[in-house]
Image (cartoon, coloured by chain):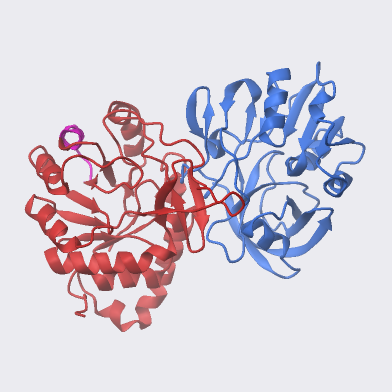
C-alpha cells in the first residue's frame, strides 16, 4: 500500500500560467514516471490527482494548472504550509523502450520532466496554447516547443516509441498514428486507489477504473475516455 | 459498535489494507446481471460534499459468486453483501444464492438507477422468505416520512436498517451552466449529509428499535459518537475514505482517547441504551 503522509511545502514557483508545488519528500517513494499522487487541496473535500513532475533529492514536485478551486488552493500554498500526500499510485510508463520520444500537451507535460530524467533526456516535443503556457518548457531542457495552431502531432512520430500525456484530442491523434504509444490519461478521481469508481474510462470495450488500470495505457487498449474533465 | 464501509466506497480486493482496518467489509451492490454503470463523468465535488452517479457498476451475480466472493473470503473479514435489483424477485434470487456471510444489505435506495417497481417492504418480505441471514434494509432519507417506511420493512422481516443512502442532487459547470455529471444528477454524500443522516437514524431507531448502521458524513470519532447517540448500532464510512484510506484506524485511535474523558462514550453500554430523547 502506498503511504499517506503530511508533508511540508517547500515553496511554490510560478512558471508561466502554471505553478510548481515543491514538497518535502519525507519517506514517500517517488515511484515511477507516470504514476501519480493524491494531494490534499486545502479547504476542499477531495484530494487532487497529480503526476509527479520532478523528484530532486528530498523533494517531490508537482506542476499545477490553477483552473479550479482545488488546483487554485494548491497553487496558493505557501512555504511552511503542510498538506497530506498519498502515493505513488497507478501504473506509470514502461521504461523498456528502444527509441523514446516524449510528447506533451499543455498541463499534460507534468509527468514528462521526471520521465525525461529517467530516460536520460530523449527527444521531446511539447505543445502549448500560448507563449505564457509555453514557459513551462523550461522544465524540459532541449525539448522542441510548438504553440497552437501547430499541433505536436504534426511532428514526425513514426518509428519512435512514443510516451505521451496531454489533452484527449492530442492523445487520440497520437493513438491513430502510433497504436503502440504509451498514453497517460486523465479522469475525475476522488480517491486514486480504486475505491470510488469515479474515474471509469472505456478500456478494451469495458468501463474500467483509470486509477487501477492506468493512468498510462497502451494506445491500442483504450477506446474512449469520453468525458471532458471539469476544472478541478 | 463496529466500523464498516459504506457500500460502493471501497474495493477490498484492490485495497485490502484499508478493508483490514474495518470490522466488516460491505461489498458494492450486486445485481442479477452485470452492469457497466453510467457514462463518465460520474463524480463531482460540491461545496461540502460530492456527487456520484456510478450507477451500480458490478460484475453481476454469477461472476460475483464465482470470482469475487471466494477472493473476498480469502481476506478473512466478515462480509456484508449489498444486494440490488429492479423487482423483488431480483433481490430474492441473489439472497437465496448467498450463504455463510455476515449479513445482507438490501440496497433499496440507489439514486442513480431507475427505482425498483416493488415497495421496500415487498422486497424485504421476498428476501425474508428465502434466507435466514441477517437482512439490513438500506433506506433513503429522501422519503418525507421515514418512520412508516422503517416500520414497514421491520414488519416485513428486516433485522436491521442501514441509514442513509446518498440524496439526489445536481452540480453545474460554472462555465457552461450544464450538469457536470453525464447522467445529469447524482447522489450527494459527504459532510453536508450528516445532519440528514442523524435525523434519519434517530427517527428510525425511535420507530423500530432495530439495529442501525448509521452513515452519512462521518469522518471523525465525534461523528461516530453522534451517530451512536442518535441510535446507530454500527457506523459506516463513505466519502471520507476517499481522501483518507487510513481513516478507520484514525477514528479508532480518536475513539480510544475520547472515550477516556467523554461521559457519553463511557456511559453507553450497549446499542440503544444511550440514545437521548429529544
**Res A225 quadrant in image:** top right
Q: Is residue A125 visible?
A: yes
Q: Is residue B1 above or below residue A101?
A: below
What residue is at 32 percent from the left and 72 percent from the top? B226
Chain with blue colouring:
A
Q: What percent of the width, then of the height, locates residue B98?
A: 20, 35
Q: How many marks?
A: 0
- The foreground one among B97 and A190 is A190
Q: Residue at left 23%, top 36%? A: B86
Residue A59 position in % (x across, y down)? 76, 55
Q: Name the residue at the top extreme.
A: A159
In this view of the protein, which residue sits in the foreground, B94 or A28? B94
**Residue B54 is covered by the magenta coloring:** no
Apparent side of residue B151 relative to residue A15 in the rendered image (left or right) = left
Query: Which chain is painted in red?
Result: B
Quarter where residue A5 is shown = bottom right
Residue stretch in magenta: B89-103
Tell me the quadrant of the picture where the C terminus of chain B can be found: bottom left
Q: Residue furthest right?
A: A142
B148 with respect to A181 (left or right): left
- Residue at the (59%, 22%) spot, across then down: A221
Image location of residue A154, percent across then percent down: 82, 24
Q: In which quadrant of the rendered image does the N terminus of chain B lie?
A: bottom left
- In this rendering, the answer to whether A77 lies above or below A194 is below
The spot of residue A158 in percent (x, y) is: 80, 17
Is residue B20 visible in this depiction of the protein? no
Name the residue at 50% across, 48% down: B179
Residue A179 sits above or below residue A119 on the image: above
Of B80 and B43, the residue lying toward us: B43
Amino acid at each position: 500500500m502506498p503511504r499517506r503522509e503530511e508533508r511540508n511545502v517547500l515553496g511554490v514557483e510560478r512558471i508561466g500560467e502554471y505553478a510548481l508545488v515543491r514538497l518535502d519528500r519525507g519517506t514517500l517513494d517517488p515511484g515511477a514516471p507516470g504514476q501519480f499522487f493524491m494531494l490534499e487541496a486545502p479547504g476542499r473535500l477531495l484530494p487532487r490527482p497529480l503526476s509527479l513532475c520532478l523528484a530532486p533529492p528530498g523533494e517531490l514536485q508537482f506542476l499545477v494548472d490553477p483552473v479550479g478551486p482545488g488546483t487554485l488552493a494548491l497553487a496558493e500554498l505557501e512555504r511552511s504550509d503542510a498538506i497530506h500526500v498519498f502515493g505513488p499510485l497507478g501504473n506509470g510508463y514502461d521504461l523498456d523502450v528502444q527509441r523514446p520520444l516524449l510528447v506533451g500537451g499543455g498541463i499534460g507535460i507534468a509527468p514528462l520532466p521526471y520521465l525525461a530524467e529517467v530516460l536520460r533526456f530523449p527527444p521531446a516535443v511539447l505543445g502549448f496554447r500560448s507563449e505564457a503556457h509555453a514557459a513551462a518548457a523550461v522544465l524540459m531542457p532541449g525539448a522542441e516547443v510548438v504553440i497552437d495552431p501547430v499541433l505536436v502531432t504534426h511532428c514526425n512520430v513514426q518509428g519512435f516509441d512514443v510516451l505521451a500525456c496531454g489533452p484527449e484530442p492530442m492523445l487520440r491523434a497520437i493513438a491513430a498514428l502510433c497504436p503502440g504509444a504509451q498514453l497517460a490519461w486523465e479522469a475525475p478521481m476522488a480517491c486514486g486507489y480504486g475505491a470510488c469508481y469515479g474515474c471509469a474510462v472505456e478500456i478494451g470495450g469495458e468501463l474500467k477504473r483509470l486509477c487501477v488500470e492506468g493512468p498510462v495505457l497502451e494506445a491500442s487498449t483504450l477506446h474512449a475516455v469520453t468525458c471532458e474533465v471539469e476544472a478541478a | 459498535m463496529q466500523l464498516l464501509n459504506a457500500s460502493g466506497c471501497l474495493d477490498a480486493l484492490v485495497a485490502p489494507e484499508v478493508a483490514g482496518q474495518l470490522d466488516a467489509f460491505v461489498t458494492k451492490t450486486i445485481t442479477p446481471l452485470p452492469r457497466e454503470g453510467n457514462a463518465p463523468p460520474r463524480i463531482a465535488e460540491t461545496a461540502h460534499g460530492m456527487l456520484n452517479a456510478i450507477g451500480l457498476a458490478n460484475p453481476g451475480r454469477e461472476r460475483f459468486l464465482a470470482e469475487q466472493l471466494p477472493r473476498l473470503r480469502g481476506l478473512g473479514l466478515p462480509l456484508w453483501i449489498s444486494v440490488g435489483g429492479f423487482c423483488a424477485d431480483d433481490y430474492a434470487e441473489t439472497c437465496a444464492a448467498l450463504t455463510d456471510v455476515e449479513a445482507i444489505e438490501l440496497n433499496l435506495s440507489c439514486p442513480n438507477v431507475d427505482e425498483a417497481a416493488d415497495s421496500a417492504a415487498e422486497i424485504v418480505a421476498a428476501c425474508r422468505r428465502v434466507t435466514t441471514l441477517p437482512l439490513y434494509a438500506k433506506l433513503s432519507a429522501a422519503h418525507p416520512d421515514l418512520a412508516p417506511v422503517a416500520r414497514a420493512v421491520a414488519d416485513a422481516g428486516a433485522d436491521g436498517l442501514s441509514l442513509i443512502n446518498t440524496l439526489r442532487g445536481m452540480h453545474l459547470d460554472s462555465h457552461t451552466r450544464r450538469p457536470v455529471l453525464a447522467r445529469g444528477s447524482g447522489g450527494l454524500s459527504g459532510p453536508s449529509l450528516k445532519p440528514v443522516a442523524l435525523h434519519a437514524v434517530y427517527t428510525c431507531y425511535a420507530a423500530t428499535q432495530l439495529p442501525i448502521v448509521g452513515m452519512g458524513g462521518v469522518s471523525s470519532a465525534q461523528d461516530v459518537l453522534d451517530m451512536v447517540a442518535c441510535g446507530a448500532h454500527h457506523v459506516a464510512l463513505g466519502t471520507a475514505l476517499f481522501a483518507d484510506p487510513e481513516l478507520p484506524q484514525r477514528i479508532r485511535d480518536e475513539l480510544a482517547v475520547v472515550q477516556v474523558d467523554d461521559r457519553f462514550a463511557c456511559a453507553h453500554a450497549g446499542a440503544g441504551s444511550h440514545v437521548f430523547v429529544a
